[in-house]
Image (tube, coloured by chain):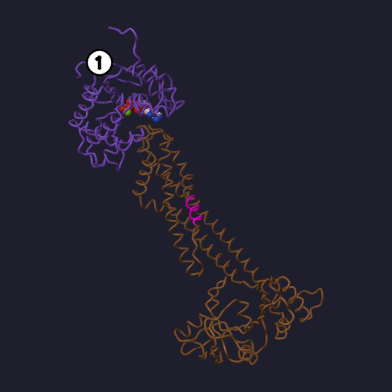
C-alpha cells in the first residue's frame, strides 16, 4: 500500500557529483548519484577501489559537500549550510566509525567515548555515565580505563563504535569497520552493528569489500566508476 | 568546556615535559631578564634616592680646574690653606667648609695590613658628610694646628684591622707614620658610585700634608650651606671669591669648578632610571623572540596531531573549539614560562642586589606586566597555529599519516 503523503526520506542524493582537481587531472569521484535511504535501513556499499564509496560516505556524513547536485538530510539541503551548521548536524545525528579505528592516542577508552559529549557541552558526571553505558553496550564494560594502545584491534573497534553511538545518533556511518580484523572478530563486530540497527533502530550505512560482511545488510548498493551499478535487497539478512 | 580544554593543554605540556621547557626557554629568559633588570634598577635608584635624602645639608664640591671634555683639570693649581680661611670668613651662607687632601697608603696594625684611602681634612668634613662617630672623639684644635699624628678610622678599616679589639687609643701605622686612633666612624656603606666609603682613614689635613704628602695641596673643598640657606647664592659667592683670590681676569674662564652634589646625585638617579627602562626594553625584545619559539613548536604540534584534529572535527568539534584548544595550549605554555621566568628573575635580582648592596624591592607592577605580556605573547603567537588547526579539512586530516 502506498501512502498518500510521501514522508521525507532520511537521506536523499539528487544527481550528486563530486570532482577533484581541474583540467586534465580532473577525477570524477561521483558522476551523478541518485539515492534514497529511509530510516531504519541497513545498507552496505560495495564496489572496486576508487569507485567512490568513501566519497559517498563523506558526503552523507557532511564532512564533504557535493560539487553539483543536492544532498538532503531529513529534507534539509546540506549545501546551504555553513561549516559550523554541518558540524552541529554531524554532532547530533551522525556517528562515525572510521576505517582504522581512529582513536586518540594516549587516551583511555572511556575518555575516547566521552569526546563527542564534551563538544556537546555535557557535564562531566553525565558524560561519564553515558560513556560507560555505551562501552557496556559494546561489551567493554570492564575495560573503560585501558589506554587505546592496550586494547586489541577488535576492542579498539568496539571503542570506536561506542564513541559513535554514545550520542544516540540517527545514522551510523561505518567505512570498512572490519577491514583490519580477523574473521571471528569481524563476525562479533557485525553482530553488534546488526543489533544496534535492529534493537535501537539506528540507520546503518556501511562500506565493505567483503561479500560475507555485506551479507549482514538488508540492502546492497554496488558502485562502479562513481555511479550506482546495482541496488539490491538482500532477503536473507536478518 | 574551558576547563576541559585547560586540562587537555596541561596534559599535552606534561606529556612533553622536556620539550615544553625548551620551548618556553625564550619566555623564561625574557620574563626573567625584564624582572631582574627592573628590580635591580629599582633597587639602585632607591639607593641613590636615599643617598640624596641623606645629603640633608646642601653640599657643594669645589674642585680646581674644569671638568669636561678637552679640559685637563690637573693643570689647574690646587687650593691652599688661605683659600679655606678666606672662605670660612667670607661665606656668610656657609655652615661648614672642609678642605680635602687625599692619598692612598698602607695601614698596618699588628700583623694585619691593608691599602686604604687616607683623607686629610678638618672636623667640618663630618658636618658636610652628615657623618657621626660610633666611638671616640673628633680632632682637637691643637691637633689640627699642630698636625698631630692622630686619626679617625672607617668601619671597614676597624673590622679588618682590629677585629674584636677596641681601636681607640691604639697606635696605627699609616704609611710610615705611627698614628693614634682617636675615633671610629659609623658605617656608611657603598657610595652611589659603588665604592666602599668605610674603607678610609681620616687625619688632620696638616698631618697628611707634612708627614705623608710632602706638599700643602688641597685637591677639593666641601662647602655645606646653612639650613634653609640658598645653595645657589653660596655657589655664586664661592665663584666670586675664588676668582678674586686666584686672580682671574674678567672675561676669562674659571680655573676651578663648583658642583652641587645634590644635582650630581639627581643626575645619577635620572641616569639609573633611564638605564633601567632601557635594559627592561631590551629584555622585552627577548620576550618576543620567545613568542616565536612558541609559535614554532605549536606549528610542529599541529602537524604532529593532524590526525587527532581530524578526529575531533569529524566527531563534532566546532572550528572555534579546536581554535580554543590550541590557543589555550599556547597560552598555558607561555604562562608556564612566565612563572618560571618570574622565579628566575626574582632569584637573580635577589643575588645581584645583595652583591651590589642595594635594597631588594619587588615591584608587583612589573611582575604582573611581565606575566601578562608573556600570556599575550602566547595568544598572539599561538593564534596562527591554532587557526591553522581549526581550518583543517577533516577528511584530509583523517587521511594524514
Ligand atoms: N582529496 C582527493 N583529491 C583527489 N582525488 C580524490 C580525493 N579523494 C578521493 N579522490 C579520488 O576519488 C576517487 C574515489 O575515491 P574514494 O575514496 O571514494 O574511493 P573508494 O571507493 O572509497 O576506494 P577504496 O575502496 O580504495 O577506499 C578515487 O579515484 C580517488 O583517487
Ligand atoms: Mg574508501
Is the residue marked 1 within 8 Å of ligand 1, measured from its CB? no
Give the image quarter of residue A234. Answer: top left
In the image, farthest residue toward the right: B250
In the picture, measured across the screen, residue B124 lies left or right of residue A151, that is right
Between residue A3 and residue A32, name the one nearer to us. A3
Residue on which the image places disc 1: A233
Q: Given the image, what chain letter belongs to the residue carrying mark 1?
A: A
Q: Secondary structure at mark 1?
A: strand
In the picture, measured across the screen, residue B49 lies left or right of residue A120, that is right
Give me the residue at 55% from left, 65% from top: B46
Q: Is residue B206 magenta?
A: no
Give the image quarter of residue B127. Answer: bottom right
Residue A156: percent from left, percent from top:
25, 36
Give me the residue at 27% from left, 23% from top: A202
Q: Is residue B362 above or below residue B171?
A: above
Residue B343: percent from left, percent from top:
43, 58
Amino acid at each position: 500500500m502506498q501512502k498518500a503523503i510521501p514522508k521525507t526520506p532520511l537521506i536523499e542524493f539528487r544527481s550528486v557529483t563530486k570532482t577533484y582537481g581541474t583540467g586534465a587531472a580532473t577525477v570524477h569521484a561521483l558522476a551523478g548519484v541518485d539515492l534514497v535511504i529511509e530510516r531504519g535501513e541497513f545498507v552496505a556499499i560495495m564496489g572496486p577501489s576508487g569507485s567512490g564509496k568513501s566519497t559517498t560516505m563523506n558526503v552523507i556524513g557532511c564532512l564533504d559537500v557535493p560539487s553539483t547536485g543536492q544532498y538532503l538530510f531529513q529534507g534539509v539541503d546540506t549545501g546551504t549550510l555553513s561549516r559550523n551548521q554541518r558540524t552541529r548536524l554531524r554532532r547530533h545525528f551522525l556517528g562515525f566509525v572510521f576505517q582504522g579505528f581512529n582513536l586518540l592516542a594516549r587516551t583511555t577508552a572511556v575518555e575516547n567515548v566521552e569526546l563527542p559529549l564534551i563538544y556537546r557541552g555535557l557535564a562531566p558526571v553525565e558524560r561519564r555515565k553515558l560513556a560507560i553505558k555505551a562501552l557496556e553496550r559494546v561489551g567493554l564494560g570492564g575495560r573503560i580505563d585501558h589506554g587505546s594502545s592496550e586494547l586489541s584491534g577488535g576492542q579498539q573497534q568496539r571503542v570506536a563504535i561506542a564513541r559513535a553511538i554514545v550520542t544516540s545518533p540517527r545514522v551510523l556511518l561505518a567505512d570498512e569497520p572490519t577491514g583490519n580484523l580477523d574473521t571471528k572478530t569481524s563476525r562479533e563486530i557485525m553482530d553488534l552493528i546488526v543489533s544496534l540497527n535492529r534493537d535501537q533502530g539506528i540507520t546503518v550505512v556501511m562500506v565493505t569489500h567483503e561479500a560475507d560482511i555485506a551479507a549482514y545488510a538488508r540492502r546492497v548498493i554496488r558502485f562502479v566508476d562513481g555511479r550506482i551499478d546495482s541496488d539490491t535487497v538482500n532477503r536473507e539478512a536478518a | 568546556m574551558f576547563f576541559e580544554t585547560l586540562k587537555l593543554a596541561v596534559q599535552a605540556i606534561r606529556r612533553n615535559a622536556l620539550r615544553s621547557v625548551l620551548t618556553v626557554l625564550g619566555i623564561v629568559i625574557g620574563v626573567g631578564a625584564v624582572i631582574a633588570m627592573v628590580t635591580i634598577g629599582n633597587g639602585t635608584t632607591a639607593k641613590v634616592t636615599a643617598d640624596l635624602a641623606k645629603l640633608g645639608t646642601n653640599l657643594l664640591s669645589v674642585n680646581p680646574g674644569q671638568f669636561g671634555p678637552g679640559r685637563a683639570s690637573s693643570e689647574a693649581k690646587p687650593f691652599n690653606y688661605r683659600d679655606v680661611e678666606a672662605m670660612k670668613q667670607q661665606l656668610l651662607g656657609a655652615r661648614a667648609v672642609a678642605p680635602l687632601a687625599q692619598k692612598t697608603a698602607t695601614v698596618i696594625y699588628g700583623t694585619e695590613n691593608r691599602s686604604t684611602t687616607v683623607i686629610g681634612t678638618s672636623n667640618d668634613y663630618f658636618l658636610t658628610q652628615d657623618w657621626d662617630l660610633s666611638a671616640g672623639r673628633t680632632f682637637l684644635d691643637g691637633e689640627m694646628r699642630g698636625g698631630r699624628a692622630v686619626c679617625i678610622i672607617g668601619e671597614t678599616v676597624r673590622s679588618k684591622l682590629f677585629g674584636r679589639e677596641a681601636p681607640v687609643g691604639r697606635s696605627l701605622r699609616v704609611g710610615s707614620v705611627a698614628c693614634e686612633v682617636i675615633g671610629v666612624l659609623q658605617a656608611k656603606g657603598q657610595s652611589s658610585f659603588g665604592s666602599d666609603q668605610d674603607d678610609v682613614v681620616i687625619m688632620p689635613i696638616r698631618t697628611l700634608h707634612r708627614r705623608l704628602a710632602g706638599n700643602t695641596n688641597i685637591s677639593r673643598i666641601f662647602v655645606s650651606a646653612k639650613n634653609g640657606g640658598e645653595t645657589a647664592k653660596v655657589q655664586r659667592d664661592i665663584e666670586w671669591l675664588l676668582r678674586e683670590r686666584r686672580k682671574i681676569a674678567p672675561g676669562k674662564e674659571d680655573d676651578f669648578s663648583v658642583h652641587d652634589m645634590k644635582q650630581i646625585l639627581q643626575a645619577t638617579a635620572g641616569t639609573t632610571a633611564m638605564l633601567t627602562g632601557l635594559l627592561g626594553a631590551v629584555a622585552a625584545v627577548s620576550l618576543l623572540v620567545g613568542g616565536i619559539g612558541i609559535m614554532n613548536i605549536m606549528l610542529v604540534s599541529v602537524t604532529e596531531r593532524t590526525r587527532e584534529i581530524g578526529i575531533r572535527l569529524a566527531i563534532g568539534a566546532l572550528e572555534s573549539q579546536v581554535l580554543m584548544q590550541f590557543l589555550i595550549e599556547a597560552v598555558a605554555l607561555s604562562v608556564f614560562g612566565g612563572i618560571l621566568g618570574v622565579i628566575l628573575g626574582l632569584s637573580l635580582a635577589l643575588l645581584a642586589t645583595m652583591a651590589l648592596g642595594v635594597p631588594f624591592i619587588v615591584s608587583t607592577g612589573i611582575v604582573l606586566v611581565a606575566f601578562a605580556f608573556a600570556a599575550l605573547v602566547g595568544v598572539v603567537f599561538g593564534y596562527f597555529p591554532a587557526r591553522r588547526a581549526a581550518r583543517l579539512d577533516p577528511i584530509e586530516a583523517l587521511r594524514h599519516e
